[in-house]
Amino acid sequence: MTTEQQTEQEAEREAEAKAEVPAEAADTAPDTAAESLPEQPEAAEQPEAAERPQLAKPSRKPLFLALARWTAAVLVFGGVGTGTALGITSMERTEVPGLATESDGRWEYPELSLPALPVGVPRPYTKGNDGEIHHADLRKLLLPAPAGATPDPKLNGGWVTVDQFLSQYRKDDRAKLSTPLAESALRHIAARGWTMPDGTMTRIHLLRFNSVAFAEAFKDDALEAGTVDGPLLDGVEGVEFDGTFPSDIRVAYTVPYAYVELPHNADQTRWVYIQAGDTLALITQTRKGEALTVPFQQTVALQNQLLG
């Protein structure tokens, strides 16, 4: 290659190098121009915005409904055990007297609730009711019969006479009770009875007196509750304190006195007196062979809750 040819090639390379410089400047020019442009209104930057489909705003209705459901649930569960509810808290399933199970012989009672009172009338054992008076209809404080029971037509949850109540006792003891009962300012007696398929007969009598003092006097002096020397129920051969009656199912402000017939003949009876303010309860259960402890304790616990 001659010297002239080399000179021409070098000249061509220099010309090509100079031509590449403006091209690089052209690549960077739009960025520089964009940075120096003044800000434009949004309508100018997006002229097609009106033609684009508008996205729906997130609805707050599902969130509101979910919040409402959770709020309602909290209120329902938070209200259990307050007011007139009779639920028992902090106990295992097998410890709740009113809950029927398949293994321990409990009866299936309906859901319980206390009867409504007139406005401003306090329940017993509350502020403003120092006399421990049950202002509710005594008949509505009777425990309802469990599922499968055959009601006693003579003890159907209404009022009964003094003679009917005294018929629960042996003939020799009826005369001993009639006089103090007549002198005790008794107001009225309500009763309910039923028989279960296994033959267990239950009788509940509620006696309301004019005051706590009269109720306690009849319980202590006539019935001699708390001892084994008081009058015996009709057909009962012997009596002992019921040592199987648990203390953890008792209700505040009420006092139970539980007994069991020992020895016994063909059938056996369990019974209990419950002192609850101005009201005294007598609950009896009789069954051929043996009066079972589980339904007896369950019945007593639920009736006691209604009185407490």
Image (cartoon, rainbow, N blue to C red):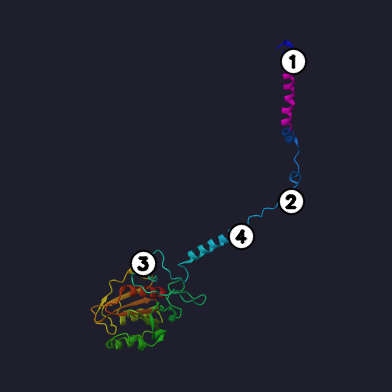
| Disc 3 to disc 2: CB gap under 8 Å | no
Q: Secondary structure at mark 1?
A: helix
Indicate which label's residue lies in the foreground, 1 or 4: 1
Indicate which label's residue lies in the foreground, 1 or 3: 1
- For marks 1 and 3 on the same chain, the one whose residue lies earlier in the sequence: 1
Characterize the local packing of mark 4: few (<14), some (14-19) or many (20 or more) Cα atoms within 10 angstroms. Answer: few
Q: Amino acid at mark 4?
A: Lys
Q: Amino acid at mark 3?
A: Thr
Q: Amino acid at mark 2?
A: Glu
For residue 187, say whether it is visible.
no
Q: Main secondary structure of the magenta part?
A: helix
Q: How many angstroms separate mark 1 from mark 4 (CA)? A: 81 Å
Checking the image for residue 19, the label placed there is none
Q: Which residues are magenta?
A: 12-29
Checking the image for residue 8, the label placed there is 1
Q: In the figure, 36 relative to 220: above or below? A: above
Q: How many angstroms separate mark 2 from mark 1 (CA)? A: 60 Å
Percent across and percent down for residue 227 are: 27, 77
Characterize the local packing of mark 3: few (<14), some (14-19) or many (20 or more) Cα atoms within 10 angstroms. Answer: few
| Of the pair 283 and 120, the residue shown nearer to us | 283
Task: Name the residue tied to disc 3.
Answer: 94
Checking the image for residue 51, the label placed there is 2
| Of the pair 191 and 70, the residue shown nearer to us | 70
